[in-house]
Image: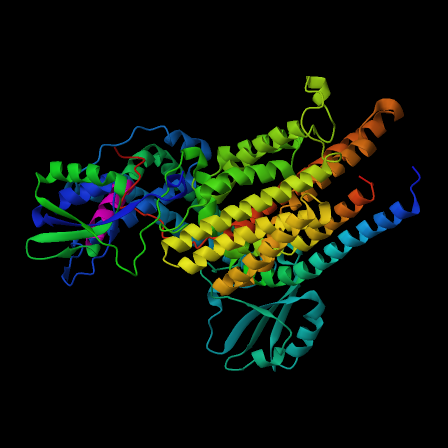
Amino acid sequence: MAIGIDSAIAAIGAGIAIAGGAIGTGVAQSAIGAAGLGLIAEKPNQMGIVLLFLVLPETLLIFGFVISILIMIDAGLI
Amino acid sequence: MVDLLRTERMEKVRMLFSDRLKDKVISYLHENGFLDIRKSRLELEDDAPSFELNELSELLIRVDGAIETIEKFSNKKEKKADNNFRPYKKLSRKELIEKAKRLKTVEKALKLNELIKEEESNIESLKKALNIGLMFQGIMINFSKLDSDYISYKAYLVSRNKAEQFSNALKKIENAEVIKKELDERFGKKVLFFIAYEKGMEIESIFGNIGAEELDLKAKHLEKDPDYVVEKCSREIDKIKNKIKEAENSIKRMQKNLGELLAYREMLEIEIERESVKSNFKKTGYVFLVEGWIPKKDAEKIKNGLDKITNGEFELEVLEKEKDELAPTLTNRPKFLKPFDYMMEFYSIPRSDEIDPTWIFIISFPIFYGLMLSDVGYGIASLIFVTWITRFTNPEGLVYNAAKIWQIAAISSIFFGVLSNQYFGYQLNKYIGLGNFGFDWLKDATTILLATILFGVAQVSLGLFFGFINKWDHGEKIVAISKITSILTIFTGIFAVGGFFFHIISASLTIYFGIAAIAFLVATALMSGIEAAEITNLMTHPLSYARILGFGMSSVIIAMLIDQAFTPTLSHGIIIFLLLLILFILLHFMNMILGIFEGIVQGVRLNFVEFFSKFYIGGGIKFKPFYYKKKYVK
C-alpha cells in the first residue's frame, strides 16, 4: 500500500508522540520503581501502594497515545 | 440510592447490668456479635478478668501444643477427613477446665513430642561422634585414654590446599607427635591432623589464619577405639530412629482425637475472650457498665434479647457521639461481593461518615478490566485458572479474595470479548450467528476513544459530586461548593473545546461556554486552595481513561499478529506444525498474562487515583464485634 508524503509525515509524528510519552514514562518509572523496591524491602505490606505509584506516570504514555490517535485520524490513517 | 452509598448507620450505646448477670450478658453478647465494645470514658473503677484467665490460658497453650504436634505428623488425607466430624456440645467453664486438665491425648502428645525432640538431639551428638570415629578409622587411638597429666591431644580438619602450610606450622611445636590422614569426599576432601604435644603449651597462635577446624575429642560417645565408636554409634542411631518412628506412629494414631482437641481449643478460646473482655468494662459495687457501637438496624433486636435474658433488669442508653470519635464502619453486601470490601480494606476503609464508593468500584472495575482484556478465549482461560485457585486457597486470605474479584472480571472479559468479536484474536462471531454484532477495536477506535473519555468525564464528575456531599456533611460548605464549580468547569470546558476544535456548537455559544469555563475555574480556585491545585487534573484525569482504549487495542493487535504469524498448519509438515503450535500457545499465554496484569493494575488505578482522589477520605475503623465464629462447637 503506497501512502502520500503527508500521511507519511503524520505517521512519523504519531510515532514521535507515543515514543515521547513512552520515554517520559520510562524515566519516571525507573526512579519510582527503584525507590518503591527500597520501600518493599523494608515494608513488604506496602507493595500495593508502590504498585499504584509505579503506574501513575503511565498517564504520560496515554497522552502520547491519544495524540498519536488524533494525528492518525486527522491524516485518515485509521 | 444514597443508602447504598453509605455504610451501616451505627449507634453508640451504654448498658448497665447487675453484677450477678455478668456471665449471662457476656455470653449473650458474644453469641450474637452485635456490639463493638469500647472502654467507657466515665470515671469509674475498671473491671478486670478473674484468676481463671491464667488457668484457661495455660490450658490453651497445652492443647494448642498437642494439636500442633498431631498436625505435624499427620498426613494431608487424614487432616481432610477430620473436617467431616460433627460439632461438639459446648461445656460450661467449670466442666471445661476440669476435663481439659484431664485430657489424656494432650498429655501423651506433649510427652511424645518432648521425647522425639530429646532423641533427635541424641542422634545429633551420636552423628557427631560417628563422624569423628569414621575419620579416625585406621589410626591407633583410644579415645578413653586421651586424658594425661603430661600430654595434650588435639585434632584438626584442614582443607587439602592448606594442609602443607598447616604441616609446616606444626613443625614449630617442640616434641610434638603428628598423625596426618587424608579424608575422602564424605568429609569434604579435608586432611585430618592428630597432634600430641606437651601439656601447657599454647599452640593455636601457631596456625594463624590457616582456617583449621578443631574436632572435639571429648565429645559424648567417644570411647575406646574408632571402630568401636563407629559400630556403637551406628547401632545406637538405628535404635533411636526406630524409637522416634514408634513415637511418630503413636502420634499419628492420635489423629482420631484431633476433632476433640480442636473443639477444646475453640471452647478455651471462647472462654478466654469472654474473660478478657471484662477489662473493657467499668464497675461499681453492684453493677457493671458496657459501652460500644451497635448497628442501628439491630438496636431493637438487642433490646429484646437483653430484656429476655435479664428479665428487664438492665438500662440501655443511646449516647451522643463525642467530637473526636468516629463510628466504626460496617458494610452490608451480598457474600459474593465481599471480596471487593476486602480489597477496599487494602487501600483504606471508608469512614462511617462519608460516601462509600465500593459499589461504584464493584461496577466499574469489571467494566474496565473486561474492556482492556476483551477476548472470549483469554476470559475463559483466566476464569478456569481463577476458579481452580479458589478451590485450594484460604477464604480469609488475599489470594482467594483477589481470585473471586478476578472471576467476576473474567466473566466481563468474555462479555466484552463477544461484543468486540475477539476469540484469541480471531473474529468468530459470524460462525456463531452473531454477524457483525458489537464493535471493532480498530475500525471504531475514534468512537471508543470518545466513549472512554466521556466515561472518564462522568466518573470524575461523580467523584466531585461525592466530594461535594462529603464536604457538605462535614460542614466545609465553601469547599463543597468548589466541587460543584469544578464539575461546571469540566462541562462548560468540554463544550468550549468541542466548539472551538470540532465545531459541535455555534461560534457565539463557544465563546459563552469559554467565558463560563474560565469563570468557574477562577471561582473554584478562589474558594479552595486544594481544588485550585487540582485544576489541571480536571482535564488530565478524564483523558486518563483513554488508557482503556490503549491497553484494549494493544492486546487485540498483539493477538491478531500472533494469529497471523504463528497459526499452526500442516502444510509444512508435522514438526513445523508442532513448533508453531508451541509458539502459538506460548505467545498467546504471554499476551494474556500481560493483558491480565494491565487490566487489574489499570482498572484499580482508574478507580483509586482518578476517581477516589476527588472525594475519598478513608481511614475508617472496621466494625469488630465481640464475637467468636464457631467451627467445632455448637
B406 shown above or below B507: above
Q: Main secondary structure of the magenta part?
A: helix
Residue B275 lies within the magenta run: yes
**Is residue B230 shown to the viewer in this render?**
no
Q: Is residue B523 above or below residue B451?
A: below
Q: Position of residue B61 (x, y in %)?
A: 29, 50
Count of labels shown? 0
Considering depth in this image, is B456 or B79 the residue closer to the camera?
Answer: B456
Tell me which segment is drawn in magenta.
B264-278
Which residue is nearer to you in this view: B197 or B413? Answer: B413
* Residue at position x 22%, y 49% in the image: B56
Q: How is the image coloured?
A: rainbow
Outermost residue, front side: B508
Q: Position of residue B3 (x, y in %)?
A: 37, 40
User: x, y percentage for residue B59?
Assistant: 25, 48
**Residue at the location (66% across, 45% down)?**
B546
Quadrant containing the C terminus of chain B is top left
B509 vs A20, left or right, is left
Q: Residue at x 66, y 58 (%)?
A: A29
Which quadrant: the N terminus of chain B?
top left
Closest to the observer, B499 or A39: B499
Q: Is residue B550 visible?
A: yes
User: Who is closer to the viewer here, B21 or B293?
Assistant: B293
Q: Image check: B554 left or right of B84?
A: right
